[in-house]
Image: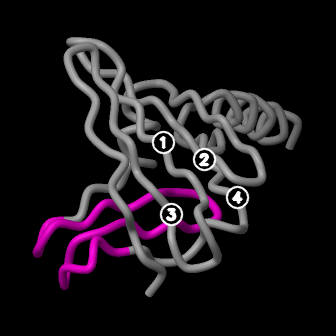
Amino acid sequence: MKRILLLSVIGLAFLSGCMFLQPLPTMSPPAWIQGTWSFGEVGAGYTFTATTVLMTIGVTTLDMGAIYRASGGVTEIITDTLYSFAVPHETGDITYEFRLVDANTIQLTERTAFSTTGPIPLYRQ
């Protein structure tokens, strides 16, 4: 009986240290941006949840939260009118900056080491 108890304790200690049992880091989009925003084109835009950001273009959806977990981290800036995050890339961070214009409009600016695109309006769906 003591042997079974000892093996159980050792097993639990081992499992508690395994990576797959650790909570995965998440992104934290603020409440004001949560929902779906589009470029005005069907199937192109961003969806923000409490724990991730999804970018959709046509039939392709990219989960920024998955990139965050795979890359080891995303830097986020959150205010009442700004949500910004930087995704690590081999040529330098890619920064996505979303600014609140009004309740139904945000503006996206993308920055890389080589260029800046935007601001581009997105509309709440």
At 55% from the left edge and 40% from the top edge, which residue is drawn? 84
Labels 1 and 2 touching (C-beta < 8 A):
yes
In the rendered structure, which amino acid carries the disc numbered 1? Glu
3 or 2: mark nearer the eye: 3
Helix, strand or loop at label 1? It is strand
User: Which residue is labeled 2 in the image?
Assistant: 83
Question: What residue span does the magenta drawing correspond to?
Answer: 38-60
Front in this rendered view, residue 38 or 51: 38
Label 2 to label 4: alpha-carbon separation: 7 Å
- Quadrant into which the N terminus falls: top right
Q: Is residue 112 magenta?
A: no
Label 3 to label 2: alpha-carbon separation: 10 Å
The disc, 3 or 4, on the residue closer to the chain's N-terminal end is 4
The disc, 4 or 1, on the residue closer to the chain's N-terminal end is 4
Residue 39 higher or lower than 90, as above or below = below
The quarter of the displayed image where residue 102 is located: bottom right
Labels 3 and 2 touching (C-beta < 8 A):
no
Q: Position of residue 3 (x, y in %)?
A: 79, 33
User: Which residue is labeled 4 in the image?
Assistant: 30
Marking on residue 97: 1
Q: Is residue 59 magenta?
A: yes
- Quadrant into which the C terminus falls: bottom left
Left or right of 114, for residue 6: right
